[in-house]
Amino acid sequence: MNRSEINRIIGSAKNFLAEKQFYLPPWAFWGIDQWKTNTDRASEIIENMLGWDITDFGSGNFYSRGLFLFTIRNGKHNVDKKTYAEKIMIVEENQETPLHYHRSKMEDIINRGGGNLVIELYNADQNGQPDTSRPVNVKTDGISRVIEPGSEVILTPGESICLEQGMYHRFYGEPGKGTVLVGEVSAVNDDASDNYFHEAVGRFPTIVEDEGPVHLLVSDYGKFL
């Protein structure tokens, strides 16, 4: 991805978050100089990968297959006491996050407003593949339901779903319903070792530096700080 595209996506995200009255912490808006001044004090942010996170999953087409995320809080296994994480995400109509599951993380995905979020579900079988024969037992807002493998659950604003470990999920914004503001509340998040995609994808983008960063991504910390 070009840095100029990432900067544009961040600008659009700021506008959408403001429209939905969702507010980020002050450090979200730091530039590189402020980061360098505050690196020691902000060690938890850097080490636990909090902040701006934009990916096209290696597709080369962010709006077809991609995701905007901002990690607000997160712990780190065997390092600190925090056992939970929280993210805010923006999902466009027909913008796919590819099929994947987690072995460690359990998460609630919440439609915080805007359009509808479509989630396709399977269980992972003993070989880590989508199980096409076994129904999926899942809870939406604490209510149990059983769906056929590969079926879709549609979350309207205010609705949520609990995704347990080993539950394959793929999601996108429902066409014609608008951009979706999506929350995630979960156990500690580890993108380096706990994302199991059904197909090979790139979790973090390869960035062409055609201009300077407006804000650092979580994948930029090692490069700039």
Image (cartoon, rainbow, N blue to C red):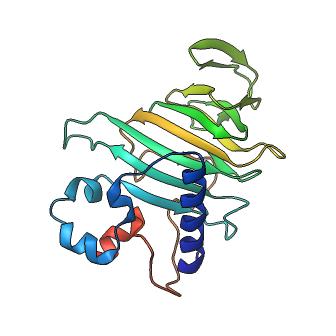
The x, y position of residue 12, in whole percent, is 61, 63
Q: Is residue 96 left or right of residue 202?
A: right
Q: Nearer the viewer, residue 130 or 217?
A: 217
> In which quarter of the view is residue 224 placed?
bottom left
The x, y position of residue 108, in whole percent, is 51, 30
Name which residue lies at 32% across and 76% down: 32
Name which residue lies at 71% across and 31% down: 156
Q: Is residue 100 visible?
A: no
Looking at the rendered structure, the number of numbered marks drawn on it comes to 0
Q: Residue furthest right?
A: 176
Name which residue lies at 55% across and 29% down: 163
Q: Nearer the viewer, residue 157 or 39?
A: 157
Is the C terminus in the top left, top right, bottom left or bottom right quadrant?
A: bottom left
Q: Residue furthest bottom?
A: 210
Is the N terminus in the top left, top right, bottom left or bottom right quadrant?
A: bottom right
> In which quarter of the view is residue 148 placed?
top right
Q: Nearer the viewer, residue 40 or 29?
A: 29
Compared to residue 64, the image places residue 17 above or below, namely above
Q: Is residue 30 visible?
A: yes
Name which residue lies at 56% across and 33% down: 109
> In which quarter of the view is residue 132 placed?
top right
The x, y position of residue 129, in whole percent, is 63, 38
